[in-house]
Amino acid sequence: MKKYEAIFITNNQKNEEGLANFIKETETLITSLDGIVHQTEDLGARQFAHPINKKTMGHYISIATSLPENKVIELKEKFRLDPNVFRVEVFSYDKPENYEAQQTEQIRT
């Protein structure tokens, strides 16, 4: 399995309970696709540079996961027609384990 980072941009109109349900459902979907969820991070609401579907703000969610390579397309297709999800981008996640320590060391020198 390969590590990925999935970024979801959802409708900002959702309440906190709806957002928590979306995250839980997404994590359940990933595990049903034989994946492992490593970290979920709520990045908060942000304003868009250009409107998407006539909306100017969206809620960003980042999920670091391990998935079989052939399951990434299934993950993206699940949300393609969902009206509450504006974008789904899945990136290869190659951040080293000690990334934070490396960044701190570079700042000091």
Image: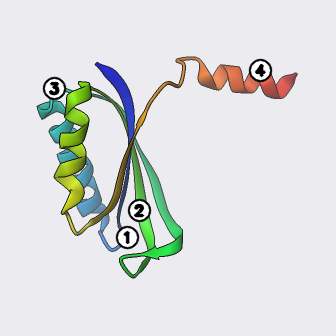
Q: Secondary structure at mark 2?
A: strand
**Residue that appears at 26% across and 27% down:** 69
* Total marks in image: 4
Q: Secondary structure at mark 3?
A: loop
Q: How is the image coloured?
A: rainbow
Quick one: label 2 or label 1, which is nearer the N terminus? 1
Q: Amino acid at mark 1?
A: Asn
Residue 34 — which label? 3
Q: CA distance from mark 4 to mark 3?
A: 36 Å
Quick one: label 2 or label 3, which is nearer the N terminus? 3
Cβ atoms at labels 2 and 1 below 8 Å apart: yes
Q: Is residue 81 left or right of residue 97?
A: left
Give residue 26's position: percent from left, percent from top.
Answer: 22, 45
The residue that label 4 is drawn on is 105
Q: CA distance from mark 1 to mark 4?
A: 37 Å
- The foreground one among 50 and 20 is 50
Q: Quadrant of residue 28?
A: top left
Q: Amino acid at mark 3?
A: Asp
Using the image, determine if residue 95 lies above or below residue 15: above
Give residue 52's position: percent from left, percent from top.
Answer: 41, 73
Q: CA distance from mark 2 to mark 1?
A: 5 Å
Q: Is residue 13 left or right of residue 106?
A: left
Using the image, determine if residue 27 lies above or below residue 92: below
The residue that label 2 is drawn on is 59
Q: Secondary structure at mark 4?
A: helix
Q: In the image as oriented, which residue stretches furthest toward the right?
A: 109
Give residue 2's position: percent from left, percent from top.
Answer: 34, 21
Q: Secondary structure at mark 1?
A: loop
The residue that label 1 is drawn on is 12
**Residue that appears at 11% across and 33% down:** 32
Q: Amino acid at mark 4?
A: Glu
Quick one: label 4 or label 3, which is nearer the N terminus? 3
